[in-house]
Image (cartoon, rainbow, N blue to C red):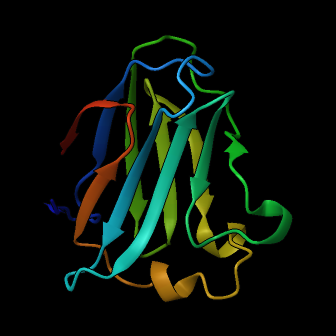
Amino acid sequence: VYIPWNPDSETITVNTDSVAGTRKRDHVSVWFFDKDGNYAGNVQFHFYTLLEYWIEWCYTGRNAVFKPFPVAPPTETQKTWTLTYNYTERKVVLHCNGEEVLNEVLSSACTLTNWRDYWDRKPTQIKFAGLAPDSYCIE
């Protein structure tokens, strides 16, 4: 199910109660799509051994793995994740329980040569995947 979303004015909030290392397959994946249903990006974070993130169609080579967050997320079990995507700047910002844990400008972070093939598409809708989301809202 596609969920309408305007990255210029709306944030995505996801609530989780997963702890790193307890459930191997827990993750949250937010897929971005343009108005025609084409992939326009994907941001994932998982609760495997560590809390880590991945930005799809961005990394290559040694960087093509899940990465630890630049700032460690809070340790509480109940987490509220707020995802903001600034399309104009191609910037992904993620907060956890009100603390900024990720702020990636894709033009600086991406090592994949064709990253713009996906991230230059203006997202207008999203889909969620993963076992970790308990609830979500678009605000």
Q: Position of residue 40 (x, y in %)?
A: 39, 76
> Which residue is at a point 39% across and 18% down the rendered structure image?
17
Q: Is residue 54 above or below residue 70?
A: below
Q: Position of residue 3 (x, y in %)?
A: 15, 59
Say whether residue 25 is left or right of residue 125. Answer: right
Give the position of the N terminus as an image quadrant.
bottom left
Q: Is residue 63 above or below residue 80?
A: below
Residue sticking out furthest to the top: 76
> Which residue is at a point 41% across and 65% down the rendered structure image?
86
Say whether residue 3 is left or right of residue 42. Answer: left
Quadrant of the rendered structure where residue 134 is? top left
> Which residue is at a point 40% across and 14% down the rendered structure image?
78
Compare residues 83 and 20 and report the one nearer the observer.
20
Compare residues 117 and 83 and report the one nearer the observer.
117
> Which residue is at a point 37% across and 77% down the rendered structure image?
39
Q: Is residue 116 above or below residue 4?
A: below
Q: Position of residue 53 (x, y in %)?
A: 60, 46
Quadrant of the rendered structure where residue 109 is? bottom right
Compare residues 70 and 44 and report the one nearer the observer.
44
